[in-house]
């Protein structure tokens, strides 16, 4: 066979193509099993960070006013000056009320339960009280 015929016949066999496709399928499966479920864990981590930020704003409110906002005033007291506030910064303590990654507003109760100064929490993925796993309420500790 001369060089020209070898160039015309060069290429991949069906077996070689099938092996490559199988390897790509295995790699895709490994990547997908490691990625699936991580988005919910990332949402929980983001929620905990947001709760911490809101808690710092609540503590600043207390420093200025010698008390935390009431349950009725709620977290809105961090955005708009409540009637009971003696000292209040221009622009408030937060520019807007934060939501958890599932689009639910954070819950606030003062005084708190279980020895906490206040309860600050997210309702989790399902948006209702209680739940398990990613549906569980996420409390600021």
Image: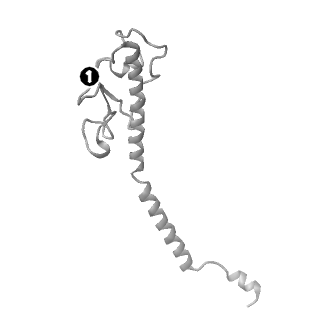
Furthest residue in direction bottom, as rendered: 1
Q: From this viewpoint, which residue is outermost toward the right?
A: 3
Q: Residue at x 71, y 85 (%)?
A: 6
Q: Is residue 113 above or below residue 61?
A: below
Can you tell which quarter of the image residue 8 is in? bottom right
Which color mode does the image show?
A: one colour
Secondary structure under tag 1 reads loop
Residue located at (35% from left, 9% from top): 83
**Is residue 22 rendered to the left or right of residue 117?**
right
Q: Position of residue 27 (x, y in %)?
A: 49, 65
Foreground of the two, 115 or 109: 115
- Circle count: 1
| Mark 1 crowd level (few <14, some 14–19, many ≥20, 10 Å Cα) | some
Q: Say which quarter of the image contains residue 101.
A: top left
Task: Tell me if residue 137 comes above or below residue 120 in the rendering.
Answer: below
Look at the image and tell me in which quarter the N terminus lies. Answer: bottom right
The answer to whether 117 is drawn above or below residue 37 in the figure is above
Residue shown at 48% from the left, 16% from the top = 91
What residue sits right under mark 1 in the picture?
111
Give percent across and percent down for residue 56: 41, 26
Percent position (x, y) of residue 21?
Answer: 52, 70
Q: Residue at x 37, y 11 (%)?
A: 85
Which is nearer the eye, 14 or 51?
A: 51
The quadrant of the picture occupied by the C terminus is: top left
Residue 108 position in % (x across, y down)? 31, 26
């Amino acid at each position: 066979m001369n060089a020209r015929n070898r160039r015309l016949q060069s290429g991949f066999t069906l077996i070689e193509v099938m092996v490559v496709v199988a390897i790509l399928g295995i790699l895709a499966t490994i990547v997908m099993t490691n990625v699936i479920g991580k988005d919910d864990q990332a949402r929980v981590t983001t929620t905990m960070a947001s709760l911490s930020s809101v808690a710092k704003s609540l503590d600043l409110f207390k420093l200025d006013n010698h008390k935390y906002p009431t349950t009725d005033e709620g977290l809105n007291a961090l955005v708009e000056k409540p009637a009971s506030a003696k000292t209040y910064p221009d622009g408030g303590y937060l520019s807007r009320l934060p939501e958890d990654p599932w689009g639910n507003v954070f819950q606030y109760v003062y005084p708190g339960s279980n020895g906490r100064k206040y309860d600050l929490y997210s309702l989790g993925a399902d948006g209702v009280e209680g739940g398990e796993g990613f549906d569980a309420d996420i409390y600021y500790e």
